[in-house]
Every structure is written in structure tokens, then in C-alpha cells.
Amino acid sequence: MANASLYWFRQDLRLADLPGLIAASKSGQVIPVFIFDEALGGDWKLGGASQWWLHHSLQKLAADLRAIGSRLVLRRGETVHVIAQLLEETGAQNVFASRQYQPWADETEQGVRKVAESAGGAFKRYPGTLLFEPENIRTGGGTPFKVFTPFWRACLKQPAPAQPQPAPALTSPNEWPHSEVLDTWELCPKKPNWAQGWDTLWTPGEAGASTALNTFLDSHVDSYGDGRDFPAQPNTSRLSPFLKFGEISPRQIWWTAQNAKQRSPNEAGSIDKFLSEIGWREFCNHLVTQFPAMPDRAWNPKFEYFPWQRHGANLAAWQSGNTGYPIIDAGMRELWQTGFMHNRVRMVVASFLTKHLLMHWREGEQWFWDCLLDADLASNACSWQWVGGSGADASPYFRIFNPIAQGEKFDKSGVYTRHWVPELAEMPDKYLYKPWEAPELTLKAAGVELGKTYPNPIVDHREARETALEAYATLKNVAMA
């Protein structure tokens, strides 16, 4: 197969608007490959929820390839070794791929480059994961941005991203290399099946991503500007898992959104607000390229001296949604039961963990990594550090979300909270977010027995806030060399 090439799929599980795949199609025969490398990323290998999505996404990608007369070759093992094997088995020489930005991506790609060159070919890497490549967005002084707003402003001054391209026709080899069977990878949970029912909530794959985007822009974006903060309302796109696995490209989102603005100029403000969230994803990836240790270490080195606490019982209560604060518990239960959490609630539960409980932001980062379908390494790390105060352009240390006020403001009618915390379903609105203040007769009428049917608060809000402020104040005296 002298004119054959491998296309190495990673977090770009689609056929349309994939520059590397288009380039591969022009070079001759294409052998699409996905490698399940369980060691890649170390502690940041795919979490349980992401593995569920990966299974279904690969199913869809394989079906889409079959529909155009191609196949998806699945292999399990160490990436560079598997690529070398496939090059030898097939006689292919070139390896095409989309650029990735994880801290380990460059080293892995260098290994692939070496084996491709040893086979007499080359490793050819293309953009396709971000709107703007990190090295192209710089301050006036030529340094990377550290604050989001000027970063996104600089992005918007760049030439518009190229128009997305349709899926290419692929020429297949006469003989296919062996492919493993996806089910043998056991990516989906069985005993217990904690993902039961997820297939009714989500439709992984390229077609599912397109449907999600169009549904959002056609039916919900008009309420996005203000409505995105209300978890009971369907005003968010829920595109993040599709973006994480590359089932849709940022360029497709950008141009579909721009076309929607042309059709509905009155929605332009909400659409721009939505696109700024895509900008936050860009910002996070740009930060990780300049500070690869960000998933593990505080971006602000002063926070290496922060007096984080270790209370295993409090962490367990937070993880299971049993803190005694209804909006916190609703969010954590939504996460466990659906693999997702509304963004407003993510900020509130993250603030509670890092500031009310003074637990290290890495504890939350790791829990989200395992439980979120959209657990993107850069966004997860940067967002947790933003809330905890240690990140770039971080939330001010004194910004401590009041879990009572947040529930009353953003879920005033209690629809979201009562759904995920059904033991409080009969509580009157007045006491829903502070059931410990309800009279005994009110609790009894609602079928609530604090400490038994629903927990007492694991910390007092006022006391926890004061303790957090004192802890953050200790950083003022930290002198950095």
C-alpha cells in the first residue's frame, strides 16, 4: 500500500470539517484508526463517564465510515507502538492527525513522527480542534494572554475562521488490517450500570452534535443571555460533550451561529454571549499550552501555601449530594445521574467545595474528571482554578457563593432542586433552601426529618465564609522569590 496513509483519530471523532482527514484523502488510500491507549495521560486517562461517551461515539463514527465505503480500525495499546505495527502491517508511510493540546500530546506526537519517518514517510498534523492556534494569539508585547476578556477581544480581531468543509470521499485499501471489537474494551459500566438511561438523555456522534447545535440556535438561544443562569430552563446548548470528543468543530459552531445572527439579528447579543463560552474553551487551551502543569499545580504559585483542609467525610458528602444545602445536593446528584451539570450550578458547587469546605480544588477537578461526560482537561483545570482563586483571571478570593441565595435567585420556584432532591419536594418555597429554619410542623407536613430523611448542613454558611476569608488572607503574607 505505497500510497496508503493512516488517519489517526483522537478527540476529533467526525468526518466533516476535519482538515487532516481532507489532506489524507487527497494523498491516496486512507486507513482510519483509533487507538485506545489506557496509559496515555497517566492520572488523566479517560474517566468513567467519558469512556461511556467514547464507546457510543466510536460506534457512530464506525457506522458513518461504513456508509461511505470505509472502516474504522480499532486497536488497544501504547500509541507509538501500535502506530508502528500498523505502518508495518499495511505498508503505509504517512500518518495524518489533528493537533491536540494536552500536556502529553507533543511527546506522543514526536514518537509517532519518528516511526513514520522510519517507515519512509512523515507525520502530518493539522489544526481542527480550536478556532485559533495558541501561538497566533498574543498581547501587544508578544506574550500569552492571562486575562480572558482581552484574550477574546484579540481573537475577535483576527481574520474570521475558515469556512467549515464537508466530509471528504475516502479511497479504501484493497486489504484491511485487523480491527479489535469495540465491546471487548468494556468502556461501558455493567455491574453496577451507573449509566443506565443515559442513552435516552444523549445522542453521541456527529449527527447528534449537529442536531444539538441546530436545536439550540433555533429554539433556545434567544433566552441564552439571561436564561443560561437558570438550571431548570433549557437555555443552554449542552454541546460540551460533543466538543470534547470533536464530534463537531469550533468552526462549524462559529459559522452556524454567524448564519443564525444573519437570520435573526435580534438574537445577535445572545449568540455572541454563547460564542464567548466557546472563547473560554479557547482561553483554557491556550493557558494549558503555556502552563502544562495547570491540571496538577496552582497557576498562582502562592496557592501552593494555601491551608487546604482534609475532611474525608465532608468530601464524601459533597460527592454524593448530601451536604444539607439543597442547591449543592441537586447539582451533585444531577452530575452522578446524568454525567452533566448546569454551568451555574457547577460554579456554586465548586465554590462550596473550595471555600466553604476549604478542600483542594484538585479534589473537585478529579471528581468532575471521572463523572462528567464533557471532562475536557483544559476547561476542567482552568475552571476549577478560576473558582478556587488560584487560576489566571481568577474569581476574587472574597467571592464566596451563598448556597442559600444562589438557590433562591436562580431556582426560585424550586423546579430543578425538587427534581434532584425529591425528599424536599413538599417543602414550601420559603424554606426550600434553608430547611433547618423551618418550624417543626412545616417539616412534618413536608415529610422531612432533618438528620434522617435529609441531612443537616455539614457546615454553617456564615462561619464557613469567615473561615475561608481568614484562610485566603494568609496568602497576603506569602513572599514569592
Image (cartoon, rainbow, N blue to C red):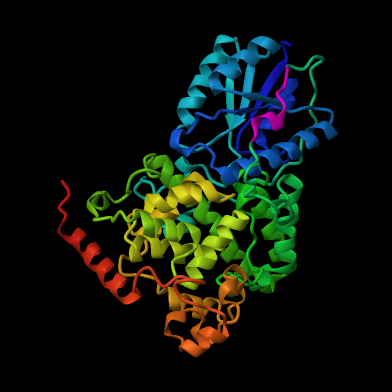
136 sits to left or right of 210: left
The quadrant holding residue 353 is bottom left
Pick the front one: 459 or 229 = 459
Q: Quadrant of the N terminus?
A: top right
Bounds of the magenta segment: 178-186
The quadrant holding residue 149 is bottom left
Visible residue check, residue 346: yes
Q: Percent position (x, y) of residue 475?
A: 20, 58
**What residue is shown at x 73% (from left), y 28% (from top)?**
72
Q: Percent position (x, y) of residue 297?
A: 33, 44
**What residue is shown at x 72% (from left), y 27% (from top)?**
181
Q: Percent position (x, y) of residue 77?
A: 57, 22
Pick the front one: 475 or 186 = 186
Is residue 425 placed above or below 307 in the rendered structure?
below
196 sits to left or right of 131: right
Q: Percent position (x, y) of residue 102?
A: 48, 37
Is residue 376 placed above or below 276 in the rendered structure?
above
**What residue is shown at x 15% (from left), y 46% (from top)?**
481
